[in-house]
Image: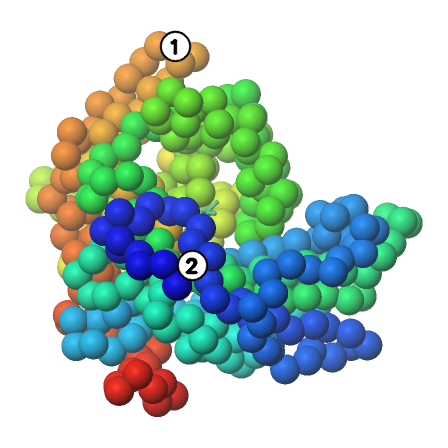
Amino acid sequence: MKEIDWSKLGFHYTEPEYIVRAGYHNGAWEEPYATKDKFLHLHVSATCLQYGQEAFEGLKAFRGVDGKIRIFRWRENAKRMAQSAKGLYMASVPEELFGKAIRLALKKNIKLLPPYGTGATLYFRPLLIGTTPRLGVGPGKDFEFIVIPSPIGPYYPGKFHCTTFIVNRHVDRAAPLGTGQFKVGGNYASSFRATEPAHAQGMDCLFLDARHHRYIDECSAANFIGIKENNGQIEYLTPRSTAILPSITNNSLMTLAKEKGFKVTRRRIRLEELEQMSEAAACGTACVISPIDKVFDPENNRIYPLTDNPGPILTELYHALKDIQYGRTEDRHGWCEVIEYENKKMKN
Ligand code: PLP
Ligand code: COI
């Protein structure tokens, strides 16, 4: 295996040695197994290719300050994948099988787990696809669950810094009662028309609600957080919408924010409310917390300035979350599955 310069990794694919697979046929899942083969022998009429029967997840394992490995909240990813599967009429991957596959992918690719202090992590991309050949429109009955591990660095280049967002009104990422709450590939392909031009301008996309184009829905592949401060009371605001992905990072940050005595509010947020926010950020597994320096609304050539550098509240929350993931503080919520790895042998 090629030497990896961990500090230079971005959010890019590094070929793992093994992936993990399990098929679903005749109503039953097979045991997950590791394979070096990264190619599928897939029927050209498989429902994933023909009708987009596909869902995925994203989660991370961290090498802690104590040398132990921590997999962050994988059960929540398993639950969300089960929701996505239900949403697309696919067989759900049982939670224990999901966990087994992640642990196996970690064990077989342990050399790809970045050392502590490099800022890089081992990202897992669980994938669920429909494999039944079908021409008539409808769901298949065969599925493949795959876990693809890859070491990654920061989602947005640079360490902890700010990103600019551009308001989008020309493309709807997901309809109010569509698939936005599920993590399915179609949501991403359908938003490339908005995200690619934004990236070309050095920005990322802020999606508004599809019905009114008035309320903040989400950042392109992350949830939105805004911070307001009123007479010393700090408020953590995040959108309520049927079209956005229930982010596990956002859920964790809301818990941490409440513990710090902040008011946590989930409601519809008008775009203009950005004016009253002292800080704002995108949050997700890949980007953790990515503070926003400004939001540009091209419709009326308006700029909502936020913070040039990460603000104090979001910085505090960022460190609180990272401290748990890297084992620098007590994991009071039991969010991490700890795996001890000594003498080059996995214990669990
Ligand atoms: N929203 C979208 C559209 C995403 O793709 C992601 C990434 O998974 C998130 C939000 C953040 O979710 P999580 O924190 O569970 O990674
Ligand atoms: C994540 O945050 O884990 C994601 O999967 C977002 C994106 C890279 C699809």
Decide which of 243, 119 is in the foreground and name it.
119
Q: Quadrant of residue 92?
A: bottom right
Which callout, 1 or 2, points at the residue further toward the start of the chain?
Answer: 2
- The residue depicted at 30 percent of the width and 28 percent of the height is 164
Residue found at x 72% / y 73%: 24
**What colour scheme was applied to this rendering of the protein?**
rainbow
Q: Is residue 260 visible?
A: yes
Q: Residue furthest top?
A: 300
Question: On the image, numbered disc 1 is attached to which residue?
Answer: 300
User: 345 or 235: nearer the eye?
Assistant: 345
Label 2 Cα neighbours within 10 Å, binned few <14 / some 14-19 / many ≥20:
many
Say left or right for 49 vs 255. Answer: right
Query: Which amino acid type is marked by label 1?
Result: Asn
Direction from residue 258 to residue 172 in the image, left or right: right
Tell me which residue sits at (52%, 75%) in the image: 101
Badge 1 residue CB within 8 Å of ligand 1: no
Q: Residue furthest left?
A: 232
Q: Work out how far the residue at label 1 is from the one at label 2, CA to CA, in angstroms.
A: 41 Å
Q: SS of the residue at dot 1?
A: loop
Q: What residue do we see at 15% from left, 48% from top?
A: 315
* Mark sitting on residue 150: 2
